[in-house]
Amino acid sequence: MNNTEKKLKLILTMKKIGVKDNRVLKTMETTDRSLFLDGIFKAKSLEDIPLPIDCGQTISQPSLVAVMTDKLNLTSRCKVLEIGTGSGYQTAILSKLSRRVYSIERHEKLKIKAQKLLHENGFNNVTTILGDGSQGIERQAPFDRIILTAAAEDVPKILLGQLKVGGVMVLPIGLPQSDQTLIRLRKEPMQVIYDEIANVRFVPLVEGIAIQEGM
Ligand code: SAH
């Protein structure tokens, strides 16, 4: 299969698993995942699998990035908070579909690398932040959308507090090394409505900023 065929196959997979929004599909098609990968992994960018990135973390599989983005129901007016910048791939997708993206990462090496890549490639509505994402960003709250790309054991209360009424949060919930559930929640004036999307496996949401192991 050549790269065009591989990409077509990938987009077909996304459609099959229920991604309907054409803007999401188009963005997935036109955002080069290999930019966010290193060395030998660049050649695997069109495979629908998670791949290793620095600091023992992983870039999610493209179909899952598409599902999570689709479930966020982004509009060009949205102010988005992302927890877990990682490679910056999901951040790039969010950037194209919303007004402003704030992305928090606890590993300085990943944060610096993603920031450079995003700015060099014209994703100018993104601010990357080194920090503990479970604390959110009080001074920028409330957010229209919040997405976590690391699994929490429960919905972080602080983040729920920083979500606008009418806002949507997409996150994996569950214990590390076990099956987790991808959840979509909508904050209504008097209640929070939860939907289960899929069984997934993500790296865990870890408290605090990571101690540098040499860069
Ligand atoms: N969306 C990323 C996925 C990266 S994996 C991508 O497409 O590449 C999840 C990331 O969450 C990891 O980089 C990990 O370091 C980060 N992370 C885990 N706990 C965190 C926390 N409390 N605050 C910020 N980032 C966190």
Image (cartoon, rainbow, N blue to C red):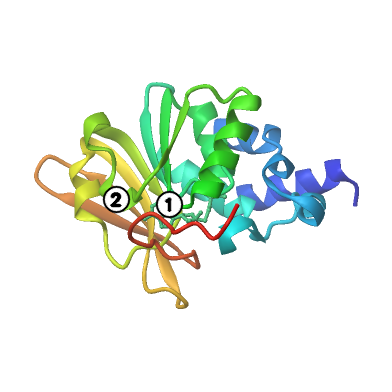
Viewer-proximal residue, 124 or 148? Answer: 124
Q: Which residue is mark 2?
A: 185
Viewer-proximal residue, 191 or 214? Answer: 214
- Packing grade of label 1 (10 A; few <14, some 14-19, many >=20) is many
Question: How far apart are the two marked residues, 2 and 1, measured between alpha carbons?
Answer: 24 Å
Figure disc tally: 2
Left or right of 87: which side holds 191? Answer: left
Q: Position of residue 200 (x, y in %)?
A: 49, 66
Left or right of 53: which side holds 213? Answer: left
Q: Relative to 118, say whether 8 is above or below.
A: below
- Whether pointer 2 and pointer 1 mark residues with C-beta atoms closer than 8 Å, the reply is no
Residue most toward the front?
A: 214
Q: Position of residue 74 (x, y in %)?
A: 42, 32
- Packing grade of label 2 (10 A; few <14, some 14-19, many >=20) is many
Judged from the image, the secondary structure of the residue bearing numbered disc 1 is: loop
Q: Position of residue 61 (x, y in %)?
A: 62, 56
Q: Which residue is mark 1?
A: 106
- Does any atom of ligand 1 lie closer than 8 Å to the CB of label 1? yes
Left or right of 11: which side holds 21? Answer: left
Residue 59 in sight: no
Residue most toward the right?
A: 2
Residue at x 49%, y 45% (from the top left corner): 85
Residue most toward the left?
A: 190
Residue at x 37%, y 27% (from the top left corner): 78
Residue most toward the bottom?
A: 178
Residue at x 28%, y 34% (from the top left corner): 143
Judged from the image, the secondary structure of the residue bearing numbered disc 2 is: strand
Badge nearest the viewer, 2 or 1: 1
N-term mark: 2 or 1? 1
